[in-house]
Amino acid sequence: MNDQRYWCDPQLPFVESRLASKSRACYVPHTHDTLSIGAVDSGHSNYACGDDRARLGPGSLVLIPATRVHSCNPDMDGEWSYQMLHLNVEWASGVLQECGIADAQDVLARSSINQNRAAYLRYCALNRLLFSNADCAEKEAALILFVSERSWLGEPREMPPVPRIAADRLARITEFLRVAYGERLPIEQLAQMADMSRYAFIRAFRAATGMSPHAWQLDLRINAARRLLRHGHALTAIAHELGFADQAHFQRAFKERVAMTPGAYRRAAVSTAS
């Protein structure tokens, strides 16, 4: 049975994604106004993009530049499963330029086919995260890393060494997070405080602290929630005060770190105190 899923988030307007399983749908030649990165999961696709023609099998990745006429269709009487990630060109170009890619616009204007297994698995992991209940800040960081590492271009390249944040800048950033842990802090703002690209900052912060910037901030929120719960505060009030998207987000994040729900933790804490 054909199953299609679509994901987007108003807080991440530069990206959307689609999954199709056991599809027999065929497409006429068409264009997208986004940079499109597709992957074949099963079956085969007859791919045409400009002068490129190929029969793509499982594990194939394709880069389709914005406004480029293309089509991808299953074999006659066949079916295929695929993923399609759409990125705003200006956003993706900005990420690459931060990493020192001066000709980012030209890079993104070249179509390519990539059969690298590791690149395909990296792409699948990113899409799983996008379709998950993870916070949008975590998804944004993963997108920045994915675009910056450029495995989807099929370029053989070694990962650059993990950069280091100057101790005084790291201390200033972590103190800022401690004070403003309930606010939604753009990764770009934190990277500017470190005087780094977003890609370099995410890697450097994780190396220095053992957590991504978002995970660090979320940990501070959960510790604050524990203090409030021990004093009997209402769950809805805590979720709002600490900047969670909603109570479900608060419940999920708390249980992942404390192994019990906020309500159960509050009952146990109040009972122990009395």
Image (cartoon, grey):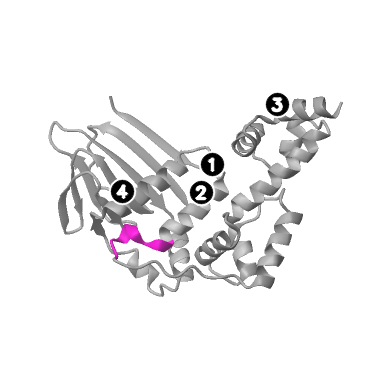
Q: Residue at x 41, y 75 (%)?
A: 102
In which quadrant is the N terminus drawn?
top left
Where in the figure is residue 62, as x and y percent of width and height? 27, 53
Q: Which residue is mark 3?
A: 264
Q: Which residue is mark 1?
A: 134
Residue 50 falls in image quadrant:
bottom left
242 falls in the magenta region: no
On residue 194, the disc is none
Q: Earlier in the sequence, mark 3 or mark 2?
A: 2
Q: Residue at x 31, y 50 (%)?
A: 120
Position of residue 130 in the picture relative to residue 177 (left or right): left
Q: Nearer the viewer, residue 121 or 195?
A: 121
Q: Which residue is mark 2?
A: 139
Q: Secondary structure at mark 3?
A: helix
In the picture shown, does residue 229 fall above or below 147? Answer: above
In the picture shown, does residue 132 fall above or below 36? Answer: above
Report crowding for label 1: few under 14, some 14 to 19, many 20 or more residues within 10 A (C-alpha). Answer: some
Q: Earlier in the sequence, mark 4 or mark 2?
A: 4
Q: Secondary structure at mark 2?
A: helix
Where in the figure is residue 204, as x and y percent of width and height? 55, 65
In the picture shown, does residue 180 fall above or below 229? Answer: below
Q: Identify the amino acid type marked 3.
A: Ala
Q: Earlier in the sequence, mark 1 or mark 4?
A: 4
Q: How far separated are the C-alphas under marks 1 and 4?
A: 22 Å
Q: Are marks 1 and 2 in contact (CB under 8 Å)?
A: yes
Q: Identify the amino acid type marked 2.
A: Lys
Position of residue 227 in the picture relative to residue 114 (left or right): right
Q: Which residue is mark 4?
A: 38
**Number of callouts:** 4
Q: How far separated are the C-alphas under marks 3 and 2?
A: 29 Å
- Tell us which disc is closer to us: 3 or 2: 3
